[in-house]
Image (tube, rainbow, N blue to C red):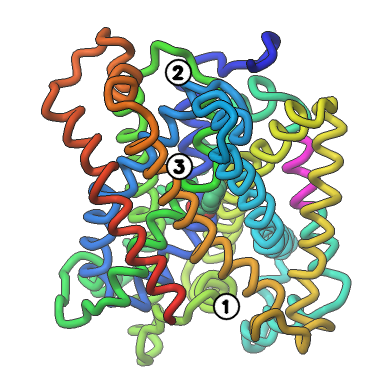
Amino acid sequence: MAPKSRETFGSRMGMLLAMAGSAIGLGNIWRFPYTLGQNGGAAFLLLYVLMLVLICLPVMISEYLLGRRGGSNPFRTFDILAPGTKWRWIGFMAVLSSACILSFYCVVGGWSVKYLADACSGVLMSFDGDYSDLFGSFISNPWKPLFYTLVFLGITGLIIALGVRKGIERMSKLMIKVLFLIIVLVVIRSLTLPGAMEGVRYMFVPDFSKVTADTCIAAMGQAFFSLSIGCGCILTYASYVDKKENIAASSAWIAFFDTTFAIVAGLAIIPAVYAIALMNGVNPNVSAGPGLVFITLPGVFKAMPLGGVAALLFFLALLLAAITSAISLMEVVVAFIIEELRRSRVHAVVTCFLLCGGVGVFCSLSFGPLEGFKLFGLSVFDFFDYITSNIMLPAGGLLLAVFAGWRLKRANYLDELTNSGNLNIPRWLSLTIYYLLKLVAPLAISLIFINCILS
Ligand code: PHE
């Protein structure tokens, strides 16, 4: 069983903000706007919400439920719930997925540290050339990005070393509040630019002619990544949660918060890109891909009044969001090392830092000196991004759904969901969640998975 001295979250609010912090991250601010831009705007948004409700929310509720019932790290949790079976290897895969995600996530986290530093020192706004050159020469430099990657991972490690309440909970509470405040300020700046409404229209007036099978897959992948499901983060946080918590309500709240934040982040970026493009008489380039935040946006900030302040606030928000997600990834690995390998928290943090930092170095160098080195035809960074987002997360989600829907008894599932009947959840709702999980989610996830293998 789990050790008795296991820490727990101190308050309901702290727990909710920590989980929301895990969900809200680079996925919302960096990935969501450009994926939206690449997939036709509002129609993508509608699909995203559909996938979220039908597939991701039931999977999230189950991950939460299993974590709370097991009360341990992912590996041990499956051993507790299905003793002596091979299911615990799903738990091990979750730990591995989190370590792999952290290894490339810390590279982008490092970029945000660098951009924040440049926004503070004024270098970013005084730069006179092409921002794609600035970005390109930074990420291909053999040393600089490594330094920032390790700084980012170091900050993450320090927070985790402080423990669940003093580290994760306290920092998430603080950072998420600041993050929300900042992003609202940036939205106000973005929406008050002349011509910004064109961008808003792009986001909210759907053009269904743009919807293809790929749009559906992209929406589902984004929802998985954004909610942090399928790799044990929600499960591990849930193991620190009080038994009285309403799992379905908390999950719905987190998903709502995460989606709202993604839309708000979109509103901070897309209307500004439209407004500045209209001002300069060029076509708005919202489908610029991963460079949208690091290449297009600095140019947008430079062209707008009060752009220096907006840039500083924006990159601070990006960094805070990245940290609250990175700590959830590191905690999965650290909880595993503490409980399975019986090491102290600090020892576990150092091990994780060395492990993920070591892989992170290769991910970072793959934009520079190691550019020519390919794994299955992909650079090291792209390889980790690809296998985690497209294979490990959906596979983890699928196995989780199968475990919760088919291995766990229905009575136990419903018992956990309703806190042994103490919560007043209508039976039709509990059953709907159960069948979405048992039937709809595995089928739909299998489809993304097959698509990933074929494409
Ligand atoms: N949800 C995080 C984001 O949006 C990324 C993440 C994925 C974090 C998986 C933990 C687990 O950036």
Say what amino acid the circle numbered 3 marks.
Phe
Q: Residue 83: percent from the left, percent from the top?
A: 56, 26
Residue stretch rendered in magenta on the structure: 151-158
Confirm or deny contact between disc 1 and disc 2 (CB under 8 A).
no
Image disc number at residue 12: 2
Which disc is residue 416 wearing? none
- SS for tag 2? helix
From the viewer's perspective, tell me whether residue 98 is left or right of residue 444.
Answer: right
Tell whether label 2 touches label 3 (CB within 8 Å): no
Whether residue 62 appears in this view of the structure is yes
Q: Position of residue 194 (x, y in %)?
A: 30, 72
Q: Position of residue 55 (x, y in %)?
A: 29, 50
The residue drawn where x is 69% and y is 14% is 3
Identified at 64% across, 67% down, the residue is: 384
Closest to the camera, between mark 3 and mark 2, is 2
Please state if 304 lies on the left or on the right of 212 as rendered. Answer: right
Vertical placement of residue 397 versus 239, above or below: below
